Amino acid sequence: MKIYADRFPTAARQLLTDLLVVAWVYLWVRAAMWLHDLVQKLAVPGQKLEGAGTGLADNLAEAGGKVRRVPVVGDDLTGPFDRAATAARAVADAGRDQQELVGQLALALAVAVLVFPLGLVLFGWLPLRLRWIRRASAARALRAAPAGRDLLALRALATRPLTELARIDPDAAQAWRRGDPATVDALAALELRRLGLRVAR
């Protein structure tokens, strides 16, 4: 007997859940990127401020250099140009600081938007998914073991609804104790189906 992980509807539910989780993560990542880009637009004034300040400072420094070449009074005349250039550089620095602040804010907001939805995936869905994978793998290994069929049947007796057990045998527990092969196989298959696995004969 071989076991395949394609039993419907459990396997289909697992696949649908996985697809929904992927879509959920994708949508929230896209939303975070959109928010990041939106907030980053607030940095445009800072970019313009930096550009204007840098350009003005360069022009003033160039003008001061030319004035400095004036005989006798050149050094005295460059003072106002140097001070104005320093002030323009301060304006450019303020523009850079504003851009950096906006960049940090954009990143912080994007991360804040992702914390909750990704937390649900990492601490809600992922542990359940890993637990299902472990259980399905253990069931696959048990089915291949000599006594695995009996253990799977016992698990079904302990966990499945009485109506399902009664459909297999009116006294399924007694049939399992006798080691009835058909009942044991049916109970084992019931447990495997619960895990999204099937037995191919």
Image (cartoon, rainbow, N blue to C red):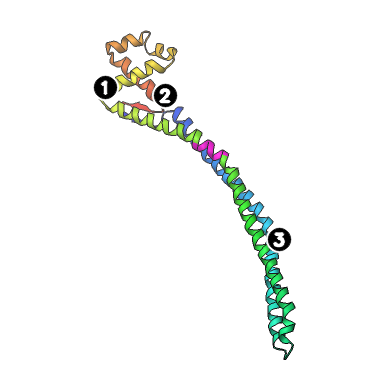
- Amino acid type at circle 3 is Pro
Horizontal and vertical percent for residue 22? 51, 40
The answer to whether residue 146 is seen in the rendering is yes
Quadrant position of residue 76: bottom right
Residue at x-position 74% and y-position 77%: 80
Residue identified by numbered label 3:
45
Residue identified by numbered label 1:
147
Please identify the residue farthest to the bottom as the structure is shown. 71
Identify the disc placed on residue 194: 2
- Amino acid type at circle 1 is Ala
- Amino acid type at circle 2 is Arg
Quadrant position of residue 66: bottom right
In the depicted structure, whether residue 160 falls above or below residue 28: above
Marks 2 and 3, the one that precedes in the sequence? 3
Mark 3 touches mark 1? (CB < 8 Å): no
Residue at x-position 54% and y-position 40%: 118
| Secondary structure that dominates the magenta span | helix
Binning the other alpha carbons within 10 Å of mark 3 as few (below 14), some (14 to 19) or many (20 upward) gives: few
